[in-house]
Amino acid sequence: MMKLFATAVLFFTTLMNAQVLYDYPQNQDFYEGGKSSFFTDLVFAAQKSGLKACDKTEALFMRFVIYPDKSLKYVADDDKVAVENNKCLKQKVLSLVKTLDKFKPAEVDKQKVPAIFYTVFTDDMLVKGSVIREDFAMPVYIHKEKEAGIEKFRENFAKCFDNVGFRPVGGDYSFRLNFDVNANGEVGFFYIDNMSNSADFNKMVIKCAANTKKSYWKAGTYKGVKVKQLFRMPLKFTAINH
């Protein structure tokens, strides 16, 4: 648990210090023509290069930072097992994205800034040019050894706050919690949109979203291959008014 907190706090600090946006602002695309054009160009580049299919089914969630000069940098993934199991696909993607030239920097107040884009890559997409949505399965929340829905996660999250009587003071507080569920079912890479000014509150958000012995996540899959997925969770707390 302490490692989880340390990772989350480090990530917040890194983002603020480097001024890298966790995601692109609403209505802005990371690529000319949007994600569909990105994959169209990526598949064309893959087929033009003559890259052969990997020896097995591979799928990998990857993040990149796009800088104001349109340069690209891969964000190293701490899910070492997933990366190792999909290293053929990873190397393909890293070599192919370097050949694309339509990346668009994010803008804030008319200033270009570094920002992260992310997606799931599959070898099937690069080789065949398409994937079937039904081949993907999203992560499943497990509570007391049984599959539970996302509402159970919300319920447990709220109970965690209730147990310690932790509430913001002075007005209702709404935010969106972003986090990964990796190939091992572990949660991490937390980011809070509309982050509170209270460091204690932000740490409590992360603590209450973390796995426990009774409640945890089962990883999502692509054709049976475990793959990281990103969750975006809108949440609202009613404040204590004095």
Image (cartoon, rainbow, N blue to C red):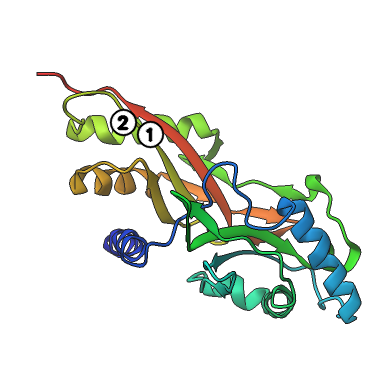
Indicate left or right for 171 with 45 as reference: left
Residue farthest along the front direction in this orientation: 110
Indicate left or right for 75 with 188 as reference: right
Please give the residue where the numbered disc 2 appears in the rendered image.
159
Please give the residue where the numbered disc 1 appears in the rendered image.
156
Could you tell me which quadrant the N terminus lies in?
Answer: bottom left
* SS category of the residue bearing label 2: helix
CA distance separating discs 1 and 2: 5 Å
1 and 2 marks in contact (CB < 8 Å): yes
* SS category of the residue bearing label 1: helix
Name the quadrant containing residue 241: top left
| Relative to 218, residue 67 above or below | below
Q: Amino acid at mark 2?
A: Lys
Indicate left or right for 173 with 71 as reference: left
Q: Residue 14: x and y, percent?
A: 34, 66
Q: Residue 174: x and y, percent?
A: 35, 30
Mark seen at residue 40: none
Q: Amino acid at mark 1?
A: Asn
